[in-house]
């Protein structure tokens, strides 16, 4: 089984290598997993606009990975930017959105869940994602740490303390019984188990659960429905041969 984790933006090579090592440690022994990036895009995603900026180049990468024989691709952002479009352009390769996956897993483990996101600017989009995932009625709250993505790893202890503090409020004030880390960088801090031990409720790491969902679905012979995510007609009807040909440039 071959799985690719796709970073939808610009990331330091050393950090990509660190994440790949963690994914390999989490993966089953017979699974090949890589981390790959794109040539342009946002340095981090903290708004819907940055999500949209990340989509076109990430879609091209996803399309190429299917041609290379990968069984699954994981979008490397818990906002799942462009997930439905990525599923439209793939016909045999599963595409996993870790945000959607984590929320759906949360309702398997409890009755009400809260998402701990990075900044106030991503709160609204987290509610929208819960609606698209079909679990909005189980969403107790979305609470922001207000620590920028690129600063989360600068002081791991401080980040854990903030997550514990906000998570405790979600449990006590919003009656959440499951917590979802709403950022892949939080996931790769590998702190979910620490927070879980302190707060005594399940804490879902989107980085790990995204991988495990991919393994489970591919291993079960399942992928997203092509009735739900239909191939763009110009591709399915043979009117274009390449993804790039869907993009028309006006002559200057």
Image: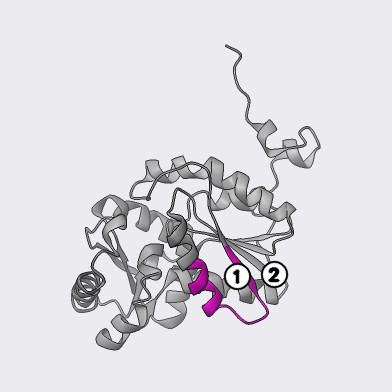
Q: Secondary structure at mark 1?
A: helix
Mark 2 or 1: in front is 1
Residue 27 within the segment the image draws in magenta: yes
**Where in the figure is residue 206, as x and y percent of width and height?**
44, 69
In the image, residue 217 sits, relative to residue 79, either above or below, namely below
**Where in the figure is residue 13, as x and y percent of width and height?**
47, 56
Image position of 151 (left or right of 12) = left
The residue at 69%/69% (across/down) is 222
Question: Mark 1 = which residue?
Answer: 214
**Where in the figure is residue 75, as x and y percent of width and height?**
52, 58
Report crowding for label 2: few under 14, some 14 to 19, many 20 or more residues within 10 A (C-alpha). Answer: few
The residue at 48%/58% (across/down) is 76
In this view, the residue in front, 153 or 140, is: 153
Question: Mark 2 = which residue?
Answer: 222
| Label 2 – label 1 distance at C-alpha | 10 Å
Label of residue 172 in the image: none
**Where in the figure is residue 132, as x and y percent of width and height?**
47, 57
Question: Magenta part of the protein: which range?
Answer: 19-34
């Amino acid at each position: 089984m071959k799985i690719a984790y796709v970073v939808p933006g610009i990331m330091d090579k050393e950090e990509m290598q660190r994440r790949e090592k963690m994914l390999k440690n989490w993966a089953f022994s017979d699974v090949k997993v890589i981390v790959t990036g794109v040539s342009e895009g946002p340095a981090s995603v903290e708004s819907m606009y940055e999500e949209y900026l990340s989509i076109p180049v990430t879609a091209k990468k996803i399309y190429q990975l299917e041609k290379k024989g990968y069984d699954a691709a994981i979008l490397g952002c818990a906002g799942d930017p462009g997930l439905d479009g990525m599923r439209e352009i793939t016909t045999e390769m599963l595409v996993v959105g870790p945000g959607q996956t984590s929320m759906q897993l949360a309702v398997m483990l409890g009755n009400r869940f809260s998402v701990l996101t990075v900044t106030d600017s991503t709160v609204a989009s987290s509610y929208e994602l819960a609606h698209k995932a079909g679990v909005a009625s189980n969403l107790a709250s979305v609470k922001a740490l207000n620590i920028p993505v690129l600063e989360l790893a600068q002081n791991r202890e401080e980040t854990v303390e903030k997550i514990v503090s906000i998570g405790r409020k979600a449990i006590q004030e919003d009656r959440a019984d499951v917590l979802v880390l709403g950022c892949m960088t939080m996931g790769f801090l590998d702190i979910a188990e620490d927070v879980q031990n302190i707060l005594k409720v399940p804490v879902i790491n989107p980085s790990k659960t995204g991988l495990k969902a991919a393994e489970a679905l591919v291993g079960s012979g399942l992928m997203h429905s092509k009735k739900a995510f239909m191939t763009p007609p110009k591709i399915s009807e043979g009117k274009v041969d390449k993804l790039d040909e869907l993009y028309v440039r006006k002559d200057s």
